[in-house]
Amino acid sequence: MTPQEIFEYKQRWMPGYAVRIHSDLRNRAIDYCKINLRQHQWKHREYTDVYEHTFYFENELDAKTFETNFEERFINQ
């Protein structure tokens, strides 16, 4: 997919399934997504709240699997 096609594809399924994480986990979360998901299956938005980033997923299963990789106290607070 070209960057334009990826952008348009994400626009169709957004907002999808959201998972909020503590901002300290940003790099680890991005690394997880790059390794385990295709580029068009997730999106990241920085500072959606104080000390919080939000990751959006096309599929609910991907969002739930993502959540299990982090301690409960750092997600969806």
Image (cartoon, grey):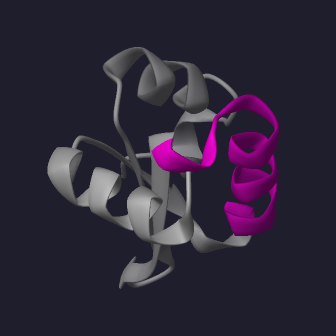
Q: Quadrant of residue 55?
A: bottom left
Question: Is 43 one of the magenta-colored residues?
Answer: no
Answer left or right for 22 relative to 46.
Answer: right
Residue situated furthest top in the rendering: 61
The picture places residue 39, in percent across and down from the top left corner, at: 60, 49
Q: Is residue 27 above or below residue 72?
A: below
Answer whether residue 15 is visible to the viewer in this image. Answer: no
Front position in the image: 57 or 64: 57
Answer left or right for 2 relative to 64.
Answer: right
Residue lying at 71% horizontally and 70% vertically, measured from the top left: 24
Answer whether residue 71 is visible to the viewer in this image. Answer: yes
Q: Is residue 4 above or below residue 58?
A: below
State which region is magenta: 25-40
Residue lying at 58% horizontally and 31% vertically, measured from the top left: 66
Q: Main secondary structure of the magenta part?
A: helix
Q: How many marks?
A: 0
Answer left or right for 74 relative to 59.
Answer: right
The picture places residue 20, in percent across and down from the top left corner, at: 41, 54
Front position in the image: 8 or 65: 8
The picture places residue 49, in percent across and down from the top left corner, at: 33, 80
Q: Quadrant of residue 72?
A: top right
Residue lying at 41% horizontally and 59% vertically, measured from the top left: 5
Q: Quadrant of residue 68?
A: top right
Front position in the image: 43 or 4: 4
Residue lying at 56% horizontally and 62% vertically, measured from the top left: 2
